[in-house]
Image (tube, rainbow, N blue to C red):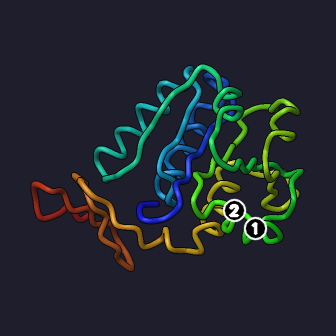
């Protein structure tokens, strides 16, 4: 989130055909809820393209990268690492500690897409559980980012947007930079 700690989300693993939608949603959630960039596996090209398209249309700043070695990203990270897993410590018990630790260093938030190697659990500074129940990694990322930013990400401003969603009690309104808006039902 601009003006605060740098937060990068790493999608660890991607099974083409099975994880396409979930990996896309990890990227979109990272963008919408305050992360500065997402690093996706190199075989998640469609997800990377979709997140880049949304960033182009609805604004940034937000960066999308791809890598052929998620393990190297974790191993070489210059800052603390939080790994989201249902086996981790409850977020409510570690969120303050994480916030303090990343005051000046960039935070890497790792979101698994398949079984992650045990070395990731060992390398992470925190293995964080958003409940200790099976659920969506997208939900875990959303709760983690909201708790980490203490809700500030919900009023984030976006620059260079071609489209802006106008909040309404009912209906839909999206204003394009080249027109006055499109009301939908």
Per the image, the residue denoted by label 1 is 97
Classify 10 Å Cα crowding around label 1: few (below 14), some (14-19), many (20 and above). few
Assign a secondary structure to mark 2.
Answer: helix
Query: Is 31 situated above or below 33?
Result: above
Query: Is 114 situated above or below 174?
Result: above
Classify 10 Å Cα crowding around label 2: few (below 14), some (14-19), many (20 and above). some
In the rendered structure, the answer to whether residue 113 lies left or right of residue 185 reads right
Task: Please give the name of the residue rendered at 85% of the width and 32% of the height, measured from the top-left corner.
Answer: 119
What separation in Å lies between label 1 and label 2 (alpha carbons)?
6 Å
Q: Quadrant of the C terminus?
A: bottom left
Task: Please give the name of the residue rendered at 47% of the width and 57% of the height, measured from the top-left corner.
Answer: 32
Q: Residue at the far bottom: name it.
A: 169
Residue 6: x, y in percent? 52, 54
Task: Please give the name of the residue rendered at 89% of the width and 50% of the height, measured from the top-left corner.
Answer: 87
Residue 45: x, y in percent? 48, 24
Task: Please give the name of the residue rendered at 73% of the width and 72% of the height, measured from the top-left corner.
Answer: 96
Q: Count how many numbered circles sit on residues in the image.
A: 2
In the rendered structure, the answer to whether residue 177 lies left or right of residue 106 reads left
Per the image, the residue denoted by label 2 is 101
Residue 4: x, y in percent? 48, 65
In the rendered structure, the answer to whether residue 70 lies left or right of residue 33 reads right
In the rendered structure, the answer to whether residue 172 lies left or right of residue 85 reads left
Residue 41: x, y in percent? 59, 27
- Foreground: 134 or 60? 60
Q: Are marks 1 and 2 in contact (CB under 8 Å)?
A: yes
Assign a secondary structure to mark 1.
Answer: helix
- Foreground: 81 or 176? 81
């Amino acid at each position: 989130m601009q003006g605060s700690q740098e937060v990068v989300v790493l999608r660890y693993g991607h099974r083409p055909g099975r994880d396409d939608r979930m990996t896309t949603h990890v990227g979109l959630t990272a963008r919408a809820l305050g992360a500065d960039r997402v690093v996706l596996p190199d075989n998640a090209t469609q997800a990377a393209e979709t997140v880049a398209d949304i960033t182009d249309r609805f604004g940034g700043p937000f960066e999308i990268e791809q890598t052929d070695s998620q393990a190297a990203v974790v191993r070489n990270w210059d800052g603390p690492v939080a790994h989201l897993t249902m086996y981790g410590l409850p977020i409510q018990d570690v969120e303050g500690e994480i916030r303090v630790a990343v005051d000046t260093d960039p935070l890497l938030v790792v979101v698994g897409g398949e079984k992650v190697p045990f070395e990731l659990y060992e390398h992470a500074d925190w293995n964080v559980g958003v409940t200790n129940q099976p659920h969506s990694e997208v939900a875990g990322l959303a709760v983690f980012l909201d708790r980490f930013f203490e809700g500030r990400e919900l009023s984030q401003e976006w620059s260079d947007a071609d489209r802006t969603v106008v909040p309404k009690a009912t209906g839909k309104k999206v204003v394009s930079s080249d027109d006055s808006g499109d009301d939908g039902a």
